[in-house]
Image: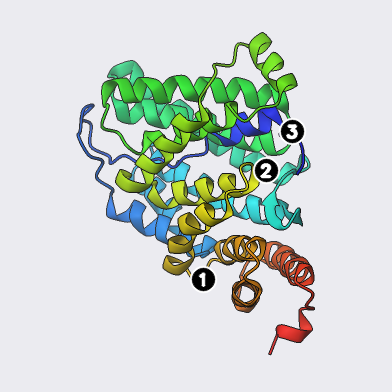
Amino acid sequence: MTAVRPFLLIATCLFVFATESLAPEARAAELSAPPAAVAVLEKIYSGDTDSALAQARRMQQEQPEHPLGYLLEGEALWWRIWCTSADFKWGMSDARRRPKLAADQHYLDLAAKVSRLAEDQLKQHETSEMQFYAGMGDAMAARLYGLRWENRNAARAGVRAREHFLRALSLDPELADADLGLGLYNYYVDTLSTIARVLRFFMGIPGGSKQDGIRQLQTAIARGVLTSDLARFYLALNLHRYDQRYEQALAVISPLAEKYPSNPLFQLGRGDLLAKLGRKEQALACYRAAQAIDVRDPECRVRLQQLVRASLASLGFSSDSVSH
């Protein structure tokens, strides 16, 4: 395994969806998802990025002063970024590093707008909802900075996001969706190497507990209104990537691959775990399923073909030998 990169982890740990409704109450016991937001998320998880982007932009037109539409657009773009940044190493497909690209500036502009719109509303009246969105704007930026290894930018944005998430939970302790962001934070910070812990101390980055993080992720899976699926993806990824708990990771990701069979990234993730567990034929079936999916985005399609070829090669197959 590769060494853990401290600030990429801190940035990624705050990866979480906007999960509250447009209602102004600060202490709603349960989040209610606007139907339009649910529809966008369904498109994102199904791998239909173009439709998700169109629907998110429609939400922006209908409510230009609310951060949710911009956040969902950023979320749809993130999955495209993740796909085109992924490679196959150490028996798994994962997004590990991305160069600094001019095309990514729009994503960062969206992150800044989410933060600004939320902060504007917080100046008028504090709610858990807008604290959550303010954190999400910082989290959006942090995860891209982390993927590009812009360590200081990632750390600063990540810590700001954490503060907003904690404040959101202090206003609404039943906000289970916020457990996704804080759960990932706690998990990742406790996964850092010794050198990274020293850097964390000097940069003033708060500590965390991996076991608390796992518990919080499980809470998001069980009770999150909109973050349950995302919590599944990241808990499975991290149990695979850092803890080598393959059987547990497989149990976490399998419902996601079954719910969204048209998302090749979920199929690849499931296949990687089956391969690690020695279930070669089942892994092959997952890789074959990913290979058969029609991906519209041309850059992502090319990258996925590369991932599938590498995955099949790890099992001793070529893409041609399983394409029919």
Measure the alpha-carbon separation of dots 3 and 1: 31 Å
> Three-letter amino acid code at disc 3?
Trp
Residue 320 picture location, percent across and down: 78, 84
Question: Helix, strand or loop at disc 1?
Answer: loop
> Three-letter amino acid code at disc 2?
Asp
Disc 1 crowd rating (10 Å Cα; few below 14, some 14-19, many 20+) is: many
Most extreme residue toward the front is: 278
Q: Give residue 104's mark.
A: 2
Question: Helix, strand or loop at disc 2?
Answer: helix
Point 40% across, 27% down: residue: 118
Q: In this rendering, does residue 311 appear at all?
A: yes
Question: Helix, strand or loop at disc 3?
Answer: loop
> Three-letter amino acid code at disc 1?
Ser
Point 72% across, 32% down: residue: 5
Q: In this rendering, does residue 117 appear at all?
A: no
Residue linked to disc 3:
149
Disc 2 crowd rating (10 Å Cα; few below 14, some 14-19, many 20+) is: some
Point 51% across, 35% down: residue: 184
**38 with respect to 83 (left or right):** left
Disc 3 crowd rating (10 Å Cα; few below 14, some 14-19, many 20+) is: many
Say which of 38 and 5 sits in front: 5
Residue 150 picture location, percent across and down: 73, 29
Q: Image height check: is 73 above or below 156?
A: below
Point 35% across, 28% down: residue: 130
Residue linked to disc 1:
262
Residue 217 picture location, percent across and down: 43, 40
Earlier residue among tags 1 and 2: 2
